[in-house]
Amino acid sequence: MRDIYLRPIGFAHVPNRERMDEVRGALPLAGSKHLDFLGLEVIERQGAATSTRLVALSDVGERGWGRHAAAVSQIFDRLIWPRAAVAGLAMNTPRLMGIVNVTPDSFSDGGRFLTAQTAIDHALRLAEEGAEILDIGGESTRPGSDPVPLEEELRRVMPVLEGLAGRTKARLSIDTRKAAVMRRAAAVGVDIINDISALTYDPEAAHTVAELGLPVVLMHVQGDPKTMQEAPHYDNVLLEVFDYLEARIQAAVAAGVARERIIADPGIGFGKTLTHNLQILAGLSLFHGLGVPLLLGASRKRFIGGLLGIEQADERVSGSVGAAIAAAAQGAQIIRVHDVAATRQALTVWEAAMRGSA
Ligand code: 7PM
């Protein structure tokens, strides 16, 4: 467990940022094209208690960090070092990942072929609307859901992956916890593995990802999908999720996954109350200290319904767009959404307004 954490704060698009060495007091966040940060929230942990203070970026070098010097220098490097491209996509601007659920509850089931064709058509439309990544999932991980057997998951996702491979310039991502699905998906050309269990569900998963050499999303969940929403508890949700993701990144690296191919995700809605989800959104930039691109998936989730009093998931589009912009404003590199067209509109305007040019 760490005893010090740094959260970048004070985001702006600083003029003359190409001459940043003359600007002082502001630095691009993880190599971002749009976002500079002007300060740090320094969070120190002493047992169960934490203390917090703010330090302007111009003062960071002047401080005596004492016993924290090495940790501060490591996290600081991670905050400013430009991220490597993921599956050929530069990580200096937010990218949209469109959600393609291939589960019986996501399409009125007119048989396997119709289900696959509906999913393929939907995916191609999301790509046209501006999704640079398509996330195909055949295992419903909604709260309270049961596990899906391997053969059934393969029957759902493989026809969709085969139908999409080579037909879109969007990268393909497979949302799965199973090594066998990862292998079969990679064989038909999938670009990214999205594992909500962060390679903990299947003992074969970590070395499989390493061997395939594909980028992997490691997500935080407390508990498992069946029971995770029964009584989520954290003493400090931000720090505990950070520690978990840092440990999972370590484990993946130890299994042979290149650090440049890891993406971290705090897992909105996975074993979290409304307040936990909001605390994660409010403190999201903390996770840049992991040194890898961040993915956030808030789209249509229950916490948005809780805030707005909207029961129907497909009526939460505008609220979801708000969450996506909040994530982009803290530097999230990949935003996972159902409503690509609406989110693309909002992101384009937000970016232009940040930069002051089209
Ligand atoms: C029903 C309810 C079906 C919720 C599906 C869901 C994430 C994910 C999901 C996420 C990453 C959904 C969720 N959520 N993968 N898979 N991050 N990396 O909204 O937040 O699609 S499943």
Image (cartoon, rainbow, N blue to C red):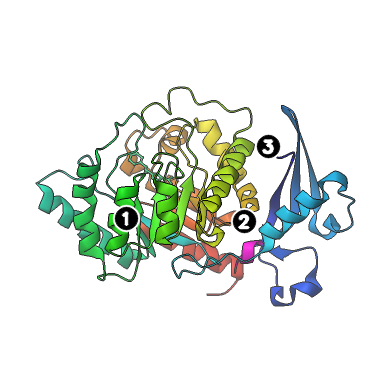
Q: Earlier in the sequence, mark 3 or mark 2?
A: 3
Note whether ligand 1 is within 8 Å of mark 2.
no
- The residue under label 1 is which amino acid type? Arg
Is residue 140 positioned above or below 79 on the image? above
The residue at which mark 1 appears reads as: 183
In the figure, residue 1 lies in which quadrant?
A: top right
Q: Position of residue 253 (x, y in %)?
A: 55, 53
What is the CA distance from the residue labelled 1 to the residue labelled 3?
34 Å
Queried whether the magenta region covers residue 264, the answer comes back as no
Disc tally is: 3
- The residue under label 2 is which amino acid type? Gly
Q: Position of residue 202 (x, y in %)?
A: 38, 41
Secondary structure beneath label 2: loop
User: Which residue is depicted at the point 50% across and 26% down?
Assistant: 232
Q: Earlier in the sequence, mark 1 or mark 2?
A: 1
- The residue under label 3 is which amino acid type? Met
Q: Earlier in the sequence, mark 1 or mark 3?
A: 3
Q: Which residues are magenta?
A: 29-34
User: Which residue is depicted at the point 54% across and 46% down?
Assistant: 251
Badge 1 crowding class, 10 Å Cα cut-off, few under 14, some 14 to 19, many 20 or more, is some
In the figure, residue 4 lies in which quadrant?
A: top right
Q: Position of residue 165 (x, y in %)?
A: 26, 66
The residue at which mark 2 appears reads as: 291
Secondary structure beneath label 1: helix
The residue at which mark 3 appears reads as: 1
For residue 342, say whether it is visible: no
Q: Nearer the viewer, residue 87 or 338?
A: 87
